[in-house]
Structures are given as C-alpha cells and as structure tokens.
Image (cartoon, rainbow, N blue to C red):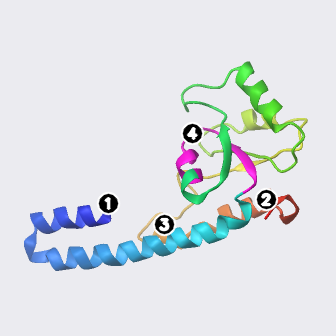
C-alpha cells in the first residue's frame, strides 16, 4: 500500500518523485520493524485463548498467530443477547487462562457480566489507539500502557509455551 501511494504521488508530482519513493522506502522499513516488534512481544501469549468485544481483532489474530476465540458482539451496533452471553460463558468454563477484552468505546459492564463467576480475566484493549498521544510518529512510539495491560492479563503462569 505504501508503494502504491508513493507511485500515485510520484505520477501526480514528478518533480518530487524521488522524495516520495525515498519516504515510502523509509516508512516500509519502519513498518516492518514495528511488525517484527509486535510479533516478538506477542509470542509468549500466542496460546492464550481470549475473546474481544467485536470481530475487528480477528485479522490481528490471524496475522500474529494468536488464539482469539471469537467476539462478544457480531457487530458493534448490536449488543449480544442472553444466548450469546451464555455461549461465551460456557466456552470459558473453568479455564483460568481465558481473557475477555472490552474496548474503550464500549461499556465494560458487558464484559464484567461475562466473566462474573468464572476464572477468566478481563481487561481493555485500545483498538483505536485512543491512548496514543497524537502527532507525527505516534504509531511508532508504541503504547507501553497497552503492553503492561497485556502482561498483567497474561501472567507467566497462564502462558503455555
């Protein structure tokens, strides 16, 4: 995608084509390094089963080989019914390694109801990067708070390697 954007900019502004392509190469290297860093940090947690509020994370799961078990809600606009909540609670069972994640944009009460009376842990994943300080390079500064939350939810005794 980065190369396609650089090519389109170069076609529209041939006088700066070299700059667009150089910037695209630099950005691609930074993105590759970020992806490698994310993969490395998530490696210990690949086997830990978890649920997210909605389906957006399944692409992330697939890319990094994580063990996402599904979403609480099929769509952010539709709250799950009693049957869906019961299904998730049954799937969680007594597995103390399961985590259920809320998101900042949605009320955490639903996640609280799902994990109540189970051994599952709950927490918040900031899927939109709302905790990031806006500005140039925000994506590459990372969110150490998110990393700390993951480590707290996936303590070493819950991680199977």
Question: Which structural element holds mark 3?
Answer: helix
Q: Which corner quadrant of the image does residue 65 belong to? A: bottom right
Q: Which residue has dot 3 on it? A: 139
* Disc 3 to disc 4: CB gap under 8 Å: no
Q: Earlier in the sequence, mark 2 or mark 4?
A: 4
The answer to whether residue 110 is magenta is no
Q: Where is residue 121 drawn, in percent x and y?
A: 82, 48
Q: Which corner quadrant of the image does residue 78 belong to? A: top right
Residue in the picture at 54% in, 72% down: 36
Q: Residues within 10 Å of mark 3 (few under 14, many from 20)?
A: some
Please tell me whether residue 56 is drawn above or below residue 87 in the rendered image: below
Q: Where is residue 29 drawn, in percent x and y?
A: 40, 77
Part of the protein shown in magenta: 47-61
Residue in the picture at 54% in, 28% down: 77
> Marks 2 and 1, Cα distance to the nearest angstrom?
33 Å
Q: Where is residue 4 drawn, in percent x and y?
A: 24, 62
Q: Which residue has dot 1 on it? A: 1
For this view, does 1 lie left or right of residue 145?
left
Q: Which residue has dot 2 on it? A: 154
Q: Which residue has dot 4 on it? A: 55
Closer to us: mark 3 or mark 4?
4
**Quadrant in which the C terminus is drawn:** bottom right
Label ID, residue 105: none
């Amino acid at each position: 995608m980065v190369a396609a954007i650089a090519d389109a900019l170069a076609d529209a502004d041939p006088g700066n084509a070299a700059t667009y392509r150089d910037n695209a190469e630099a950005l691609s290297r930074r993105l590759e390094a970020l992806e490698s860093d994310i993969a490395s940090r998530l490696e210990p947690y690949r086997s830990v089963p978890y649920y997210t509020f909605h389906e957006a994370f399944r692409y992330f799961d697939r890319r990094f080989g994580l063990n996402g078990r599904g979403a609480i809600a099929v769509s952010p606009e539709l709250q799950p019914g009693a049957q869906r909540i019961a299904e998730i609670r049954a799937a969680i069972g007594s597995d103390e390694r399961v985590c259920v994640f809320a998101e900042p944009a949605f009320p955490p009460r639903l996640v609280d109801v799902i994990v109540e009376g189970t051994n599952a842990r709950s927490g918040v994943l900031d899927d939109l990067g709302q905790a990031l300080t806006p500005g140039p390079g925000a994506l590459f500064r990372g969110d150490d708070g998110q990393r700390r939350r993951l480590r707290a939810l996936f303590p070493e005794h819950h991680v199977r390697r």
